[in-house]
Image: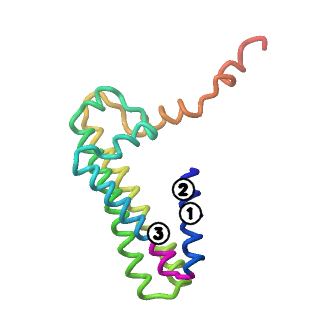
Amino acid sequence: MPIVTAAVLIRGAIGAITGSETVYFGLGIATKYVVAAVLVGSAVIGAPLATKAAPYVMEIPKNMAQHHLFASTMAIVTLIGGLYYLLSASFDIWLFRRSSVEGFVLVRFLANWPLSSAAIIAIMATTQLRLQRIPDVPPVKALVEQRLGAFWSDPDTNNSHDSGN
């Protein structure tokens, strides 16, 4: 979080110093292209970043982690994320060239909702449809719930209903 905050502050400072909307918004657009390149590049070299992120979202049983469908699914999910950022940045450039600053901010805000929703749905559907084909692996929903349960469990509250206390 400190890195993101610093990046936003630096971008704002550069925009204020230059007084240029093009520089200010251009930095954000360039960042999207860099993220797209990193995501796609990681999938192309065989180290998709979704593989690193997945354990934060869901439990990863050993038999699933070692299955070829898991590896290929993580590559596809990473590519979907990269495609989202590529499309988003390209749309931003197209829109910025054709609208006022106020119009750009409003339309980009409204347009990113369906685009990001489509990316999230594609990622969820791909993950569920592909991983359910791995033998003896519970549904993705159960894996996510297990991960969230482990994250939110509070050892102090688990013993609060002992008899007599």
Looking at the image, residue 77 lies above or below residue 62 = below
Q: Which circle's residue, 1 or 3, is located before the other in the chain?
A: 1
Query: Can you tell which mark lies on residue 136?
Result: none
Q: CA distance from mark 1 to mark 3?
A: 9 Å
Region of the chain picked out in magenta, as a range: 19-27
Tell me the residue at 40%/69% (across/down).
Answer: 30
Tell me the residue at 34%/66% (across/down).
Answer: 86
Query: Can you tell which mark lies on residue 8?
Result: 1
Q: Residue flagged by tag 2: what amino acid is it?
A: Val
Looking at the image, residue 103 lies above or below residue 48 = below
What colour scheme was applied to this rendering of the protein?
A: rainbow
Residue 22 at x, y percent in the picture: 47, 81
- Whether label 1 touches label 2, CB < 8 Å: yes
- Residues 120 and 65: in front is 65
Residue 111 at x, y percent in the picture: 45, 73
Figure quadrant of residue 32: bottom left
Tell me the residue at 45%/75% (across/down).
Answer: 26
Q: Which of the image's four quarters has the C terminus?
A: top right
Residue 88 at x, y percent in the picture: 39, 69
Q: Which circle's residue, 2 or 3, is located before the other in the chain?
A: 2
Q: Residue flagged by tag 3: what amino acid is it?
A: Gly
Q: Provide the residue designation for mark 3.
A: 28
Query: Can you tell which mark lies on residue 4?
Result: 2
Looking at the image, residue 103 lies above or below residue 155 = below
Residue 134 is left or right of residue 123, and the answer is left
- Secondary-structure class at tag 1: helix
Q: Residues within 10 Å of mark 3 (few under 14, many from 20)?
A: some
